[in-house]
């Protein structure tokens, strides 16, 4: 019994130490993480999704996988770039308002710096065969990373074994890919269906 109490006290002390260390380094870690991810992410916001998941879920263990997927879903359905939106939400989740502004700064600085440099040499880059070859190679890599995002997100839906979620996923794919309906309308409609389902379940629970 005494041993169990000591183990609990030790676990609490270790947790406190980790929280203190996290408090000291959280802002710097958030800035460096988002800055690095943004600097080496090419091909659009969706490419940054698996990188954020690996960094904040697997490496730092600051967010649960389900949480980060929910945050990314919110970021995707909000106006603006998904990379900036995701960074803002993750920063706010981890370290509040300060964390949100730091992650936005970390995400926005790399493209701002890179595009400023490229703008001075745009003509030379446009006609340079080496640059064109590099960009073509990057396009192939980006396609693979986006496919990885799709597989990961889709597999998480399947793992839930929710028929409702799978129908929504398949239906969204069909109307977007085959019917060419704007993705914004698709996301809003899916969100509305989810909201109505929650409200219906809530009313059924209250009636019981």
Image: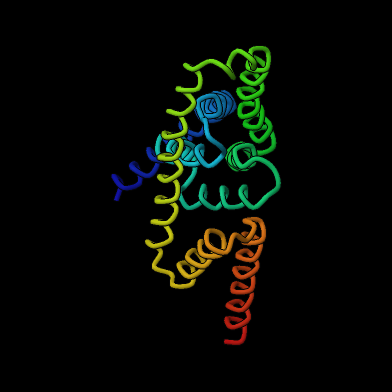
Residue 24 visible: no
Residue 171 x %, y %: 52, 67
Front-most of 106 and 44?
44
The answer to whether 192 is drawn above or below residue 126 in the figure is: below
Front-most of 123 and 63?
123
Q: Quadrant of the C terminus?
A: bottom right
Front-most of 107 and 15?
107
On screen, residue 38 versus residue 14, left or right, reads: right
The quadrant where residue 44 appears? top right
Residue 49 x %, y %: 50, 41
Front-most of 27 and 2?
27
Counting the numbered discs, the total is 0
Residue 124 x %, y %: 60, 12
On screen, residue 63 versus residue 187, left or right, reads: left
Residue 164 x %, y %: 49, 72
The answer to whether 189 is drawn above or below residue 34 in the figure is: below
Residue 201 visible: yes
Q: Which residue is located at x 62 percent, y 56 percent?
A: 183
Q: Which residue is located at x 46 percent, y 47 percent?
A: 64
Q: Which residue is located at x 57 percent, y 52 percent?
A: 73
The quadrant where residue 34 appears? top right
Q: Which residue is located at x 43 percent, y 39 percent?
A: 145
| Colouring of the image | rainbow
């Amino acid at each position: 019994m005494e041993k169990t109490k000591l183990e609990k006290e030790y676990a609490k002390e270790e947790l406190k130490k980790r929280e203190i260390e996290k408090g000291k380094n959280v802002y710097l870690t958030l800035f460096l993480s988002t800055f690095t991810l943004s600097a080496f992410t090419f091909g659009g916001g969706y490419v940054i999704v698996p990188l954020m998941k690996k960094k904040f879920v697997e490496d730092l263990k600051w967010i649960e996988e389900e949480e980060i997927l929910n945050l990314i879903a919110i970021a995707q359905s909000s106006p603006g770039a998904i990379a900036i939106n995701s960074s803002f939400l993750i920063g706010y989740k981890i370290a509040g308002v300060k964390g949100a502004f730091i992650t936005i700064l970390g995400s926005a600085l790399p493209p701002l710096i890179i595009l400023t440099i490229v703008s001075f040499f745009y003509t030379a880059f446009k006609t340079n065969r080496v640059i064109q070859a590099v960009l073509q190679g990057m396009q192939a890599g980006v396609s693979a990373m986006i496919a990885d995002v799709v597989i990961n997100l889709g597999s998480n839906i399947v793992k839930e074994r929710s028929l409702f979620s799978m129908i929504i996923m398949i239906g969204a794919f069909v109307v977007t890919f085959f019917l060419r309906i704007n993705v914004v309308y698709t996301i809003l409609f899916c969100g509305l269906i989810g909201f109505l389902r929650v409200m219906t379940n809530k009313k059924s629970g209250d009636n019981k």
